[in-house]
Amino acid sequence: MLILHGTKTSAVLNSVLADLFHLKRDHAVKYTKKNDSIRPFESGGETSLEFFSLKSDCSLLVYGSHSKKRPNNLVLGRTYDHHIYDLVEVGVENYKSIESYAYDKKLAPKLGTKPFFAFIGEHFESVEGLKHLKEMLLDHFKGEVVENLNLAGVDRIFVCTAISPTTVYMMHCALRLKRSGTSIPRMELVEVGPSVDLVLRRHRQAAESLQKEAMKAPGHAKKVKNVTNNPVEGKQGRIYIPDQEVSKLTVTSNIKGLKRERRDAKKNKEHSKKQKVAEN
């Protein structure tokens, strides 16, 4: 995740960006220098974002800015091949930072653990903007893709509640596993921060051509019967040879091998006769 500051940021927004970096500190790059040339939703204003994405090799973007028209503004974005893929703009309200929460520090989520996500509310399915925001939040915080997951290692959850068609209340909680008398433990949530109201402002879907290219799946080669590819020995083939029944084979005298043997035998016989004549 690449975290960037705009020309002007508020104290609230600085705290938001700092906490985001804290949550993703193993997989995040943060630039503190102010950037006045970034206008994500304007034509040509995304060039700097793409440059920083390429420079830092990041595919996820978070850009914070503050103005009278759009106070405490946060833009979440994704890139494909270091080109802006899609964007979601939200306003930050009622923010509570990690430092403002008092709890047993032993419950603090460990670095690099994968979170659970809970999306509550029908608006996540019916409102296009919130569906887009849901996808964006999942991609920004889900972490690395894994095949297997140890339940004991899951110690956090993001709870996102759709309060209205334009507002999502998001909070970060630690998970406490307790005995339940069954194989599935009982889970208790302890709020550890941050928490925030995200007010949807603008969102932009990916261009159709870029979306088609990004969604392209690699083709699968047609499987050839009895042929395997070994990284060490290369391409290998297997053939089927039926059992040979010698008793059913037809043997004739018109075989080249037999003719050659007869010629050789005849020559040897003539040679032995000449030797006997010479000795006499």
Image (cartoon, helix red, strand yellow):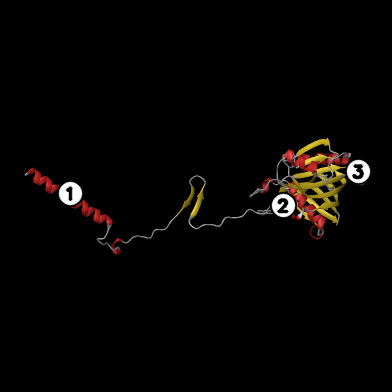
Residue 100 makes an appearance in the image: no
Residue 149 x %, y %? 65, 49
Q: Which residue is mark 1?
A: 268
* Mark 2 neighbour density, 10 Å: few (under 14) some (14–19) many (20 or more): few
Tell me the element at label 3: loop
46 or 155: which is nearer to us?
46
Q: Is residue 248 left or right of residue 209?
A: left
Q: Position of residue 33 (x, y in %)?
A: 83, 35
- Label 1 SS: helix
Q: Nearer the viewer, residue 231 or 19?
A: 231
Q: Comparing marks 1 and 3, which lies closer to the viewer?
A: 1
Q: Along the line of sight, which residue is nearer the eye, 175 or 47?
A: 47
Is residue 272 visible in the rendered image? The answer is yes
The image's mark for residue 107 is: none
The numbered dot on residue 186 is 2
Residue 178, given in percent of the width and then of the height, sits at: 71, 49
Q: Tell us which disc is closer to us: 2 or 1.
A: 1
The structure residue drawn at horizontal position 9% and vertical position 44%, both measured from the top left corner, is: 278
The answer to whether the residues at label 2 and label 1 have Cβ atoms under 8 Å apart is no
- The residue that disc 3 covers is 67
Give the structural element (helix, strand or loop) at label 2. Answer: strand
Q: Is residue 53 left or right of residue 276?
A: right
Q: Which amino acid lies under the numbered mark 2 shown in the image of this protein?
A: Arg
Residue 231 horizontal/vertical position (percent):
52, 46
Indicate the amino acid at tag 3. Answer: Ser
**Outermost residue, left direction?**
280
Quarter where residue 39 is shown? top right
**Amino acid bearing label 1:** Asn
Q: Earlier in the sequence, mark 1 or mark 3?
A: 3
Q: Does 126 appear above or below 18? A: below
